[in-house]
Amino acid sequence: MVLAGIMIVFAIAIRTTFAYTLHHQVSQRLQNLVKAGSLELEIEDGRLEIDQEDLVRDFQSLQWYDPAGQLVGTQGQPVSNLPLDPQQLVRLQTHANLQSITVPVKDSNTGQLIGFVRANESLEAVNQTLKQLDWGLGGGAILAIVLSGIGGTWLTLKAMRPIEQSMRQLQQFTADASHELRSPLTAIKTNATVAQKYPEGMRPTDAEKFHAILSAADQMTALTASLLQLARLDPSLEQHQTPTNLLHTLEELSQHYQHQAQAQGITLTTQLAEPTWVLGHEDQLRQVFANLLDNALRYTPDGGTVTIRSTRVGPSILIQVQDTGIGIKAEHREKIFDRFWQADTSRSYQIEGCGLGLAIARRIVQLHQGNIAVDSEWTQGSCLSVQLPLYEHSP
Ligand SMILES: Nc1ncnc2c1ncn2[C@@H]1O[C@H](COP(=O)(O)OP(=O)(O)OP(=O)(O)O)[C@@H](O)[C@H]1O
Ligand SMILES: [Mg+2]
């Protein structure tokens, strides 16, 4: 686009300069011609005489008039039928694709008006040249844009290769590191659990420390599991997708979370409408909605409601998890999908979670050619919507 803009400005500048120069040359030629033509007109024995010396070139003509404005002689083609207008004398006039200049002729001795002479030049040649220039500039610009587009794409792809490679290495490193962290974490957890089992001879403060170690180890286990999963959700990896009925998944999840909801005094309801078949990875999709429900229950105070709703929207299914919870501020709405982002970081140690849930959910939804969005009113509640293409040939 930038290149196209530059080319257009460049082409306009060249064309304007070229057209100006061509017209200027025509007017220069006409000035010379009319001057030569006026020398041809003279009075001999009281009669107008024209010395018909050949003065005109191709596309040029000369016309002589007597003082009364009657045409008395011509030379060359094409001629102008523009009326003689004393107001327009000595001025360049453009008419019917002709450029003309008309001047009065006076007797060199007496200074008496003896007639007029008009020089014309057809603009056909100029227009022809400009047309050729337009084609040349237009064709050249299009060719330059196409070639630079191809060249630009090639260069970008070449430049992207090392970046893609380092991204892949980084992803591999995250996956390896999270994987390797699992064994030492298990060892820490096992030892802390064993130590907690035998509190004899342990100071009360030590028991608290073991509890803190265990809870931190749990959090780290969840974090490494999430990181490992995020690293493995690579679009370049082949995903095995099968027809999945989301109705079952959502009903199962709703039952699973019913207990937690009741414990919190939250009403969890479902409003599910067929069709709900999509092509995808059932475990991954379950995880998306589990995280949405988990968030809804986590960020909704006691006595609130959480609703899972599914509706058909054209060729897609829209699944919404709506809560009457704390809501999300407008400026945070897009950030909730970022990795490690949590609205209130100070609470992150009391409230479980590491801020990866929605990042994983978004990646999964994108891998299913879907879209995830948030709509929320601060302090009033939030609604997270997942739109997925429907699988029309439901079995
Ligand atoms: N329904 C909701 N209501 C209010 N805030 C929400 C809601 N869902 C998400 N958020 C905000 O978005 C942040 C990110 O959510 P996300 O699910 O990614 O992480 P998390 O729930 O904190 O941790 P994790 O899912 O990894 O256990 C949350 O910390 C919270 O601040
Ligand atoms: Mg979450």
Image (cartoon, rainbow, N blue to C red):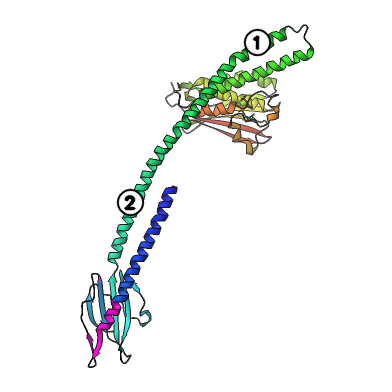
The Cα–Cα distance between marks 2 and 1, rounded to whole angstroms, is 75 Å
Q: Residue at x 77, y 9 (%)?
A: 202
Q: In this rendering, does residue 175 appear at all? A: yes
Q: Does the magenta stretch include residue 43?
A: yes
Using the image as rendered, state which of residue 179 and residue 358 is in the foreground. 179
Residue 217 location in percent, x, y? 65, 17
Height in image: 189 above or below 126?
A: above
Which is nearer the N-term, disc 2 or disc 1? 2
The magenta span reads 33-59
For the C terminus, which image quadrant?
top left
Q: How crowded is mark 1: few (under 14 residues within 10 Å), some or many (20 or more)?
A: some
Residue 177 location in percent, x, y? 56, 20
Q: Which residue is drawn at 34% across and 54% down?
A: 137
Q: Residues within 10 Å of mark 2 (few under 14, many from 20)?
A: few
Q: Residue at x 65, y 20 (%)?
A: 219
Residue 190 disc label: 1
Residue 254 disc label: none
Using the image as rendered, state which of residue 335 and residue 249 is in the foreground. 335
Say whether marks 2 and 1 touch (CB < 8 Å): no
Residue 150 location in percent, x, y? 37, 41
Q: Mark 2 points at which residue?
A: 139
Q: Which amino acid, mark 1?
A: Thr
Q: Which amino acid, mark 2?
A: Gly
In the image, is 333 to the left or to the right of 162? right
